[in-house]
Amino acid sequence: MIAQATQPQTYLVQTVIIVSLLDTIAPSRGSGRNRFGPVFFAKTAFFVSVVVAGIFGVTSFVLFDGDRELPVIPATRIESEILNTVKEFLISSDVESLDDRSVIVNCWREFEDIEFNVEYLEQGSWRVDAFYNLVRYYWRVDDLTLELTQGKSNRTTNPTIRC
């Protein structure tokens, strides 16, 4: 009999806590005293999105925190072969001059006296770079096929050529 008497009081305490929380978030106003208006739903959506974003952040940090090791692909070429590939590309490329856009120049003549840096990237490609007029130009060369691609991200205010 005592258990039956305390159970409604516990339910009443829980109801009072929920109602006071609702009064804090969206107090009942107006003549009809309806608390479930657009403001209530906007506040609820905001707080739910903050909680979901926090759970997503913690979950993604825990799941993706471990380091991943990529397999190292050994090089099959030497630096001179890679540099010759870049040299052949530059010899066959003619572009507009920096000084006069109507004049066509050969890329190799522009880069002929410049030092090239050749670096293997451990994933099957080489990076070759050189500085010309304070701008770093770079090329990627695939180790197996010797396919050359140009770097497109020369972000500078200096004039550049398309070699």
Image (tube, grey):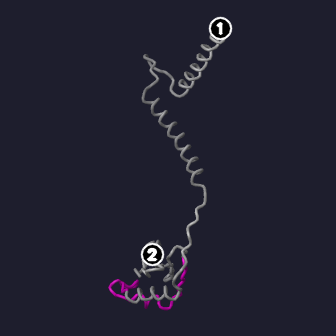
For marks 2 and 1, the one nearer the N-term is: 1
Q: Which residue is mark 1?
A: 1
Q: Residue furthest left?
A: 102
Residue 99 forms part of the magenta stretch:
yes
Q: Which mark is residue 126?
A: none
**Picture residue at 57% right of the left edge, 47% below the top:** 59
| Dot 1 crowding, Cα within 10 Å, few <14, some 14–19, many 20+ | few
Residue 29 in view, yes or no: yes
Cα distance between the residues tagged 2 and 1: 83 Å
Q: Quadrant of residue 153?
A: bottom left
Q: Is residue 139 visible?
A: no
In depth, the one of 24 and 52 nearer the eye is: 52
* Nearer to us in this view, 129 or 126: 126
- Apparent side of residue 1 relative to residue 130 in the rendered image (left or right): right
**Secondary structure found at label 2:** loop
* Amino acid type at image mark 1: Met
Residue lying at 52% horizontally and 41% vertically, measured from the top left: 52
Look at discs 2 and 1 and give the one toward the viewer.
1
State the quadrant of the C terminus: bottom left
Q: Which residue is mark 2?
A: 151
Up/down of 55 relative to 145, above or below: above
Q: Residue at x 60, y 13 (%)?
A: 8
Tell me where the magenta segment starts and ends, as one range: 93-120
Q: Quadrant of the N terminus?
A: top right
The local secondary structure at tag 1 comes to loop
Q: Is residue 88 above or below residue 122?
A: below
Q: Position of residue 138 (x, y in %)?
A: 48, 78
Give the camera-side residue of 126 and 134: 126
Circle 2: residue type: Gly
Which image quarter: residue 119? Answer: bottom right
Q: Residues within 10 Å of mark 2 (few under 14, many from 20)?
A: some
Residue 89 appears at what percent x and percent y? 41, 86
